[in-house]
Amino acid sequence: MDALFIGQTYIDVTFLIDAIPTGDEKVVARDYAVSFGGNAVSAAFCCAKLGIVPDLMTSLADDWLARMFLDMASKYGVPVHGRKVRESSLSFVMPSHGMRAIIRCRDDDYLHPVPPLDLTGCRALHLDGHQGDAAIHYAKLCRQADILTSLDGGGLRANTLELLEFIDVAICSQRLCEQLGMTPTALCQFLRQKGCRIGGVTMGEHGLLWIDEKGNMRTLPALAVPKDEVIDTNGAGDIFHGAYVYSYLAAPRDSWETHFRFARAASAHSVRYLGIEASLPTRADIAAAERAFKEAA
């Protein structure tokens, strides 16, 4: 395998609607999309779409939603190492004015232990904190084998602080800052103290604040996508992660600023489409976004 991604699978139902009905009401959405979802899962599909297909360890039930997901994975050639749960997980996503509300229905009661995988040839591991036991197990193995470890720190989970000790690149959310009571700058410094080579905080339209290998604080402004072109921001962060992992795998000697610039353009492309699958960029899409959009002031 070239890379291993570990996370929780959702089937996302994304719809455009002005208000959620209550009581005895019915409404018709203006548009909708059905796609795979989940942080590391979406990142894996992004990496595959860009041209390097990772293996994916994820939740897998024995139901029709799981079979739909396996069809999606087959389309992209993604090898799925399923970890048994009773029911598939669902997300209902409602984008609105650059934000999104989400209702999640999740089964993360794993019925089997962490499956053993052969990491021969693996060059990167990407985690989102789901499957905490598997995340720690493979992060330790990859650290010992000098395989790059990456974390989407979208929120504080039971073993996040322990897991960070085995992470090379941790790109986190403002939500994690709030949960830890830290400013973005303080979180970046904390990530370095935990042993991360690279640490960062994504801040939406305010771009990326990150700390490099030498301990220098860096900023990368967002690309200014016109507000009237922004349709659905859900999954933009996952695509950012999938794109920088792809960029690292494709050109491991390039700088992390280069990888993050590539990922920034991937995210800028993604917010202009409804649903995660439609948002996935090609390399040509990323090049077009880099040409079309200037850095935000």
Image: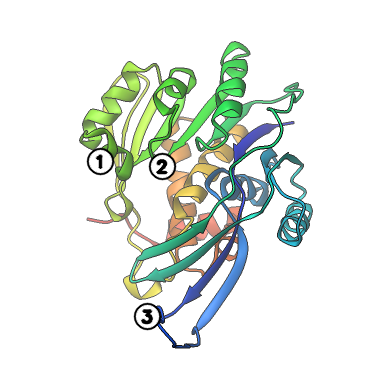
Q: Which mark is residue 134?
A: none
Percent position of residue 237, x then y? 44, 49
Dot 2 corresponds to which residue?
A: 154
Say left or right for 294 vs 131: left
Other residues around mark 1 within 10 Å, as few (<14) / some (14–19) / many (≥20): some
| Amino acid type, mark 3 | Ala
Considering the numbered disc 3 on the image, is that residue within a helix, a strand or a loop?
A: loop
Other residues around mark 3 within 10 Å, as few (<14) / some (14–19) / many (≥20): few
Q: Residue at x 38, y 61 (%)?
A: 293
| Residue that lies at the very extreme toward the front in this rendered image | 23
Dot 3 corresponds to which residue?
A: 19
The tally of labels here is 3
Q: Residue at x 49, y 19 (%)?
A: 166
Considering the numbered disc 1 on the image, is that residue within a helix, a strand or a loop?
A: helix
Which comes sooner in the sequence, label 2 or label 1?
A: 2
Colour scheme: rainbow
Q: What distance separates the C-alpha of mark 3 from that of mark 1?
A: 28 Å
Q: Residue at x 52, y 47 (%)?
A: 39
Say left or right for 215 vs 35: left
Q: Residue at x 62, y 23 (%)?
A: 138
Percent position of residue 117, x then y? 75, 25
Q: Quadrant of residue 276?
A: bottom right
